[in-house]
């Protein structure tokens, strides 16, 4: 019995010494992402997720890396999981960039109505302060042949630029 306990304790310490924490994999993936090594970043974000599947940022970052490799379906799956984690917690987190890039993934997959919904969420969460979101939504509206809606979003951007120049 003592031998079994000793082996169990020893294996715990042995595994703990060689098991890299999820944060370390995430940080390495983030550095690789910043160096545009998207495949390496995906590998490290995936390892972080294997260790701790509750890290919303790992899904979002892996999705962004996949987006940059034109894997829009894979990116969308990761963004969906990140959004699920955001909304499953007791505290709701505003993450307009997540909804923006998820919307861009949907545009790439020809889901223009879904893109408009996500990008509108990004606009709402950013309190309308990010003009790039209006441009993204205008593009999705254009593809749906909602030309009035697209022009309206473009007008918001143009008026914002005019307000900035007159200040």
Image (cartoon, grey):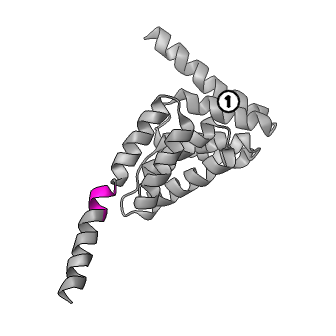
**Which residue does the image show at 27% across and 64% down from the upper left?**
14
Residue beneath label 1, please? Answer: 152
Q: Residues within 10 Å of mark 1 (few under 14, many from 20)?
A: some
**Which residue does the image show at 71% across and 27% down from the upper left?**
151
Of the pair 1 and 127, the residue shown nearer to us: 1
Q: Name the image quarter holding the C terminus.
A: top left
**Which residue does the image show at 64% across and 24% down from the upper left?**
155
Element type where label 1 sits in the image: helix
Residue at far bottom of view: 1
Can you give x and y, in whole percent of width and height, for residue 31 in the image?
41, 34
Check the image and report above or below for 8 versus 48.
below
Can you give x and y, in whole percent of width and height, for residue 69 in the image?
64, 37
Can you give x and y, in whole percent of width and height, for residue 6 in the image?
20, 78
Q: Identify the image quadrant of residue 86.
A: bottom left
Q: Identify the image quadrant of residue 142.
A: top right
Residue 87 in view in this figure: yes
Magenta-highlighted stretch: main secondary structure? Answer: helix
Of the pair 69 and 131, the residue shown nearer to us: 69
What span is in magenta?
Answer: 15-19
Residue at far front of view: 3
Would you say residue 55 sits in the magenta stretch? Answer: no
Check the image and report above or below for 161 versus 14.
above
Q: Name the image quarter holding the N terminus.
A: bottom left
Q: Identify the image quadrant of residue 108.
A: top right
**Which residue does the image show at 43% across and 38% down from the upper left?**
30
Residue at far top of view: 166
Check the image and report above or below for 12 versus 139.
below
Residue 52 in view in this figure: no
Of the pair 110 and 28, the residue shown nearer to us: 28
Check the image and report above or below for 48 versus 90.
above
Residue at far right of view: 145
């Amino acid at each position: 019995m003592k031998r079994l306990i000793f082996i169990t304790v020893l294996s715990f310490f042995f595994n703990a010494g060689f098991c890299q924490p999820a944060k370390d994999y995430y940080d390495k993936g983030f550095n690789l992402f910043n160096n545009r090594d998207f495949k390496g970043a995906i590998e490290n974000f995936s390892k972080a997720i294997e260790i701790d599947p509750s890290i919303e940022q790992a899904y979002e970052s892996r999705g962004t890396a996949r987006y940059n490799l034109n894997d829009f379906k894979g990116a969308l799956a990761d963004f969906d999981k990140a959004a699920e984690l955001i909304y499953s917690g007791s505290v709701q987190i505003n993450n307009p960039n997540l909804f923006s890039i998820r919307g861009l993934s949907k545009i790439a997959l020809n889901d223009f109505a879904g893109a408009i919904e996500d990008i509108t969420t990004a606009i709402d969460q950013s309190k309308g302060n990010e003009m790039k979101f209006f441009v993204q939504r205008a593009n999705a509206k254009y593809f749906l042949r909602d030309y009035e809606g697209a022009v309206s979003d473009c007008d918001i951007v143009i008026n914002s630029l005019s307000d900035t120049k007159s200040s």
